[in-house]
Image (cartoon, rainbow, N blue to C red):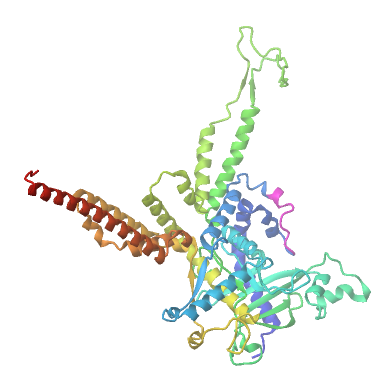
Amino acid sequence: MARIDANKLIARYNDAKTTRNRHENDWRMASAYCLPRHYNAWQTEGPANFGGSSTAATRRIAYDSTGVLALPKYVAILERIATPHSMRWHGLAASNKDLMKLGRVRGFFDELQDLVFKMRYAPRANFRQSITEVYGSLGVYGTGPNYLGQRTPNSLSKAQSFLYKACPLRDIFILLNDEGEVDTVFRRFWLNVRQFQQKFPDIALPPCMAVKIKNGATASDMDFFEFVHAVHPRTDHDPEAIDMRRHPIVGSYACVADQAYIGGEQGYRSMPYQVPRTFTEAGDPYGFSPAMQALPALGTASAVKKTTLRQGQKAADPVLLTHDDGVLNGSLDLRPGAANPGGVSKEGKKLIQTLDSGNFQISDKLLEDERRDINDSFFVTLFQILMETPEMTATEVVERSAEKSALLSPTMGRIQSEQLGPQIEREIDLLQEMGLLADGPNSPGLQMPPELIEAKGDFEIIYTSPMSKAMYAEEVSGFMRTVETSLNVAQAAQDPSHLDHFDFDTAIPEIAYYQAVPQRWMNDDKKKKAIADKRAQQQQQSELLKNSANIAGAMKSAKDMQEGTPK
């Protein structure tokens, strides 16, 4: 089946733009309160203009900076709980648990995991910057699109690497399949003639551009034209084909003005765009962000702050009330040290007084309430609990962690299912395309064990980030509460057998793992056995000393009896 007509593709693109229109006003307001440099871009057509006059425009809207300050904290929280750069936040394993008992299978997944992390955190891969921008987009707009592909080797670096690139939501339009998954992505971009020739050096200028340089005229760098990169499933996918049909995902570039394709088809083994979302509603392609949920509080905080500023100005430079007796003539000299004759009566009573500027405490209380609601939406207050109450016991800390886990679990689940899972699968596909992961027994790259080949390479992702481990906080909390109760019973009854119900040798290492205790801080089986043997030897020596003392006393008593002097 040939690819669809370009005009039909552009029609679908326009439908996707129409579907997104109802969200754009909320996104514009959310950016004004939380990401002001994006505000101007939502106001204009053409190439995105971030920054510039946006700050001046948002001054008329956002007077309070709580949203601006909460967003970086939200980004840091998501990075900390999902993709902390200081640790291996996921592992890989065969779906068949029996295969993981084989040393060569475990070794293969260890090598594959090392290779994925090496390519992901390569200097030019841009992962950390990209994922930070994705989390920021999730916080403001509820949708954080990004692109994952191969970086083209150039004069700066000839090494192979991944390319992570966060995409501005302003230029991304998505459609869902019948199962509610994002299966079609349109990425809009704008090029002038010079940029088009750099991006597509072997392709003739489209008609809308060619007319600009007709008769030898020079095209201006200020004349931009709209293009779209459309990526969607292939309807005639054939994994056995030797042409582009072997790829399940197809991509095409098109010129919007001419409704014509630019170049040929592109084939992808997996979707190059990941589009994670926060909260969603059935049937709506786009997510709802913490900023959108906090819009009432953001607006109220801004209005209260504006009123408070005006109130403060009046308090610092108050309105004056004067007696209309024709003496002052409505004129006052407010300079330091100035004299105003007639400002007091002959009895010494003040004829000039200040107008009360209002009650600041009410404004402060209103502003405090709204700021707390905003910080709650961005999980800021959730992570302030441990810092504000450092005197908590270990059990209380576990209880707090369990609460955090319950509140963050929906967000974490969406990130794993719509961002990290598809990303990791895409990374492994890219390793095969780049020749770093063998396609078969005679192919170059990391070789898959025969047992795993027989299982068709089926694998699963094991998340090991702090948040993933914190999902077991309920189990840890329940165990610690039960142990504490049993210990109290044992002490009251003077019967330690009440602690015999617990397998501490199994529980403590697992609790340490869930609490993110570094493995190097824990003793391995060999060290634990050495400690146990030493303890047993010390107990044996103690028993021998005790027994030898008793034996010596008994021998002395027997000797005394033999000598006729019993003691």
Q: Which residues are magenta?
A: 47-57
Numbered-mark total: 0
Q: Residue furthest front?
A: 563
Q: Residue 296 at what x, y percent from top left?
A: 53, 50
Q: Nearer the viewer, residue 517 or 432?
A: 517
Quarter in which the C terminus is drawn:
top left
Q: Nearer the viewer, residue 400 or 3?
A: 400
- Decide if residue 533 is on the left or right side of residue 333: left
Q: Residue furthest right?
A: 216
* Residue 548 shows up from this direction: yes
Q: Is residue 16 magenta?
A: no
Q: Residue 112 at what x, y percent from top left?
A: 56, 76
- Decide if residue 357 is on the left or right side of residue 220: left
* Residue 489 shows up from this direction: no
Residue at x 66%, y 76% (from the top left corner): 230
Quarter in which the N terminus is drawn:
bottom right
Residue at x 87%, y 69% (from the top left corner): 219
Q: Quadrant of residue 37?
A: bottom right
